[in-house]
Image (cartoon, grey):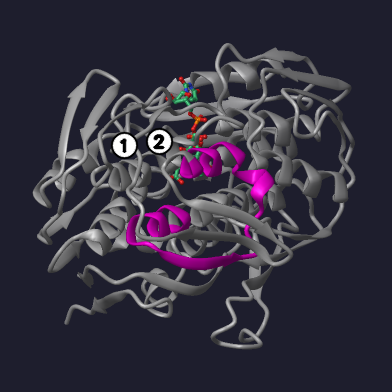
Amino acid sequence: MDRIKITGGERLTGTIPISGAKNAALPLMIASLLTSDRLTLKNVPNLADVNMLARILRNHGVDHSVDGKRADPNGYLGETFHFTARDIVDTTAPYEMVSRMRASFWVLGPLLARAHQARVSLPGGCAIGTRPVDLHLEGLRALGAEIDIDAGYVVAKAPGGLRGARVVFPKVSVGATHNVLMAATLARGETVIENAAREPEVADVAECLVKMGAKIEGIGTSTLRIQGRDRLEGATHTVLPDRIEAGTFAFAVAATGGDVLLEGARMALLETAFGVLRQTGAIVEETADGVRIKRNGNAIEPVRVETQPFPGFPTDLQAQLMALMTRANGTSVIRETIFENRFMHVQELARLGADIRLHGDSATVRGVGTLRGAPVMATDLRASVSLVIAGLMADGETMINRVYHLDRGFERLEEKLSRCGARIERLTAG
Ligand code: EPZ
């Protein structure tokens, strides 16, 4: 199994190109199930999760191809994928696949909408929490789906097709919004989704659906109004830049000191997180090419932050913020309100010498003078990358095990960081 070795203490300077967003690319790929025409996606990041989802979709009858090689192998231009679901050949998403990748559960709505039936394995719990799917099921039931749970599978039918309805989510869910939104594009009549997730990735999917012929009002707001169509068409769409990748590198620069342009990053996608970064003492500037992050020798100031759905501070940056706060000049409090168990990085950060106490959903982080490198590992993507940030700050060598988590969500992480002066390398097993 690959490992990543980091020798800490280097400042980061230069340019880091930001890839297409994983959490937009995945539902956009799933949207290809809604049409028999070709859906072309540009700026798709080359990630393990993308490749796995392409395989899962193939099982349902989605052909996919990737345009030749990248124009410039070092250019991070993203890849162009073509997806065509001429016929849905299988409406079952088996346990072996859904259990490996939670987002694949989102095929449920599109399969029901297009094929009027679906059998999709329950995703089960995962490292960051129990993550139920009740909101997905209630939303689809409101659209007329008959849903049973049988032997670990969601068995859903919509004889005669789905019909529009009012869906009021009691809680904001990104995935349930994707599922119901995609399903509603092919339902009869009007669907109104209240308390929809406003995450930019949801808006990106909605914009692609509009290019495919869907009628959607309220994109980017918490009320989405969808007029169902008989069919959707093919389209070409460019995946928006990955705000979590941009935020991760921004926290890394604040942690090590330095001056880095995050090329292609958009300030508007991350206002709250960049605001927090400014409170810690970093300089954040929007430029014509992206967002520039600087921090000189000044101390890292502590902060009080709680995670919230967009436009609040994203849970997907909580671990990275915590890594930064381990070296703050005082005590920070970080509250996780989205997932009940997203603190796996705490124990591992402690291995480097961090002083973090957990009380329920809050972590109190007392800044320490130095971190010292150590062998670490983590059980989810964002926790793993927080250890990379801590390793870049630490004295000596940090060895990150279980690198496959990083490969699920960060494209060429070590290459992007080492070009800016980090001493980071991948040790390939075998
Ligand atoms: C998406 O997960 C993202 N995944 C997550 O990113 C992200 O952390 C999360 O949204 C929150 O922003 C992708 O986009 C692929 P939710 P999702 O449904 O949709 C509860 C990463 O690291 N809930 O918005 O699964 C749920 O338990 C990943 O890239 C229900 O109670 O998250 C949680 O507490 C990890 N019932 C809250 O809602 C439901 O039916 C928000 O979850 C659904 C969710």
Question: Which quarter of the rendered picture does the C terminus lie within?
Answer: bottom left
Residue in the foreground of this view, choosing between 38 and 269:
269
Q: Are marks 1 and 2 in contact (CB under 8 Å)?
A: yes
The amino acid at mark 2 is Pro
- What is the chief secondary structure element of the magenta stretch? helix
Label 2 sits on a secondary structure element that is loop
Residue at (86%, 44%) from the top-left corner? Answer: 210
Residue at point 52%, 40% (across, down): 273
Pick whichever, 98 or 264, lies toward us: 264
Q: Position of residue 190 (x, y in %)?
A: 87, 21
Residue that label 2 marks: 123
**The residue stretch that appears in magenta:** 249-278
Q: Residue at x 9, y 60 (%)?
A: 374
- Neighbor class of circle 1 (other Cα within 10 Å; few <14, some 14-19, many 20+) is some
Specify the label residue 215 is tagged with.
none
Which of the 4 quarters of the picture holds residue 365?
A: top left
Q: Horizontally, is 169 left or right of 129 in the view? A: right
Q: Is residue 268 magenta?
A: yes
Residue 253 x %, y %: 41, 60
Examine the image and state in which quarter residue 164 appears: top right
Question: In this picture, is 337 found above or below 399?
Answer: above
Question: Quick check: 202 left or right of 282?
Answer: right
Q: Secondary structure at mark 1?
A: loop
Amino acid under label 1?
A: Cys
